[in-house]
Image (cartoon, rainbow, N blue to C red):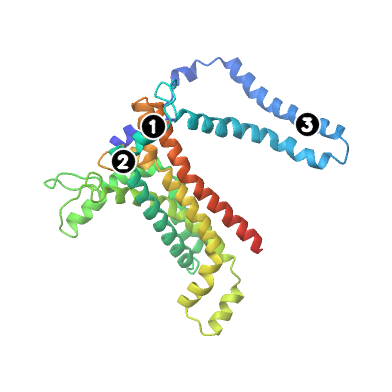
Amino acid sequence: MEGITALIRLPGLQVDWQTLLTVNLPILVAVIIAVPAALVGYTLGAEFLVKRLPKRSQPSVRPWVWVGPAILIVGLILVYPMVGTIIRSFFDRGGSKFVGLDNFVRMLTDNGVLIALRNNVYWLVLYTGLVLVFGLLLAVLSDRVRYEKPVKSLIFMPMAISFVAMAIIWQFVYYYKDPSEPQTGTLNAILVNIFHGQPITWIQDTRFNNFALILIGVWGATGFAMVILSAALKGIPGELLEAARVDGATELTIFRRIILPLMMPTIVVVGTTMVIFALKAFDVVYVMTAGNYNTDILARRMYSELYNAGNNANASALAVILLLAVVPVLIFNLRQFRAVEARR
């Protein structure tokens, strides 16, 4: 099927088996030995040097000695490429001529990019909202069932599947065949055989396709939200809830006045995480539609500009737009963490 082909085409999954089989074995062995040896050598050497310092300085220096390599690695693999991308977004396709904001203007006035922005808003609102609603609902309900652990395990199970695999599974759910033929897609089979309706092209029909794709993401992330929110729910003192029931409060009142306010910091954290996931959404759209049928989103369009069109400038501009969209969310999340810590 098309989904299997897309899986093979996905970046990062293409493997040159001939190259792997012909790699010089001594070099591989040397690398395998050298990396642990370097780590051990750094550990012993760093500790030796720290102990040579005055005792008064050791407590302040030692943490930086151990954190230093991690900061360096993060800088090399995250900060350096990010700065390079930002700089590249202000130059032309060849990277030799400074063009200012031309790349951003071109992208933000392109009809395809505007459609992708609209779809990202759909993902932002619907994906985040539905994951929070279903996650909270399932956390509250599963907390009251007899077989809580098996139920939660089943709901959490989609998180063990990659989004690419989820998309391939859901291709069978949304599969469409001509009305004259028996429907093998789950939804269309139900629609035709039980409700006696007509099959729907869930992926091609622009009335449904964006919401159909978002539903895949919701199915995959609801278990994650449920587990986090369930942990927060169990942190609420049982005596507090019992006291409210003794005072005559209904379950709905207890939920609105006690449970929801106490869980709000966790809800905010889960919500901001889902917002970031929504802004970075790529896999489901790439596998299901490749951005066709008005389902494109910014991350997939950025991939297309870079790998299909070979336009580093446009791709960098889209990457910066995505970065600017994520940064406020991260700042908000950081402030929420600080507010929670201040109240403790």
Quarter containing the C terminus: bottom right
Horizontal side of residue 265 vs 210, given as left or right: right
Q: Give percent across and percent down for residue 342.
A: 65, 61
Q: Are marks 1 and 3 in contact (CB under 8 Å)?
A: no
**Would you name the residue on which mark 2 appears?**
288
Residue name at image x 58 percent, y 68 percent: 236
Horizontal side of residue 62 vs 240, given as left or right: right
Query: What kind of element bears circle 3?
Result: helix
Query: What kind of element bears circle 2?
Result: helix
**Would you name the residue on which mark 3 appears?**
46
> How many residues crowd mark 3 within 10 Å: few (<14), some (14–19), many (20+)?
some
> How many residues crowd mark 2 within 10 Å: few (<14), some (14–19), many (20+)?
many
| Mark-to-mark CA distance, 1 and 3 | 46 Å
Q: Nearer the viewer, mark 2 or mark 1?
A: 1
> How many residues crowd mark 1 within 10 Å: few (<14), some (14–19), many (20+)?
many
Horizontal side of residue 62 vs 92, given as left or right: right
Amino acid identity at mark 2: Met
Residue 321 disc label = none
Q: Give percent across and percent down for residue 264.
A: 53, 63
Marks 3 and 2, the one that precedes in the sequence: 3
Instruction: Work out whether 169 lies above or below 70.
Output: below
Residue 103 disc label = 1
Marks 2 and 1, the one that precedes in the sequence: 1
Amino acid identity at mark 1: Asn
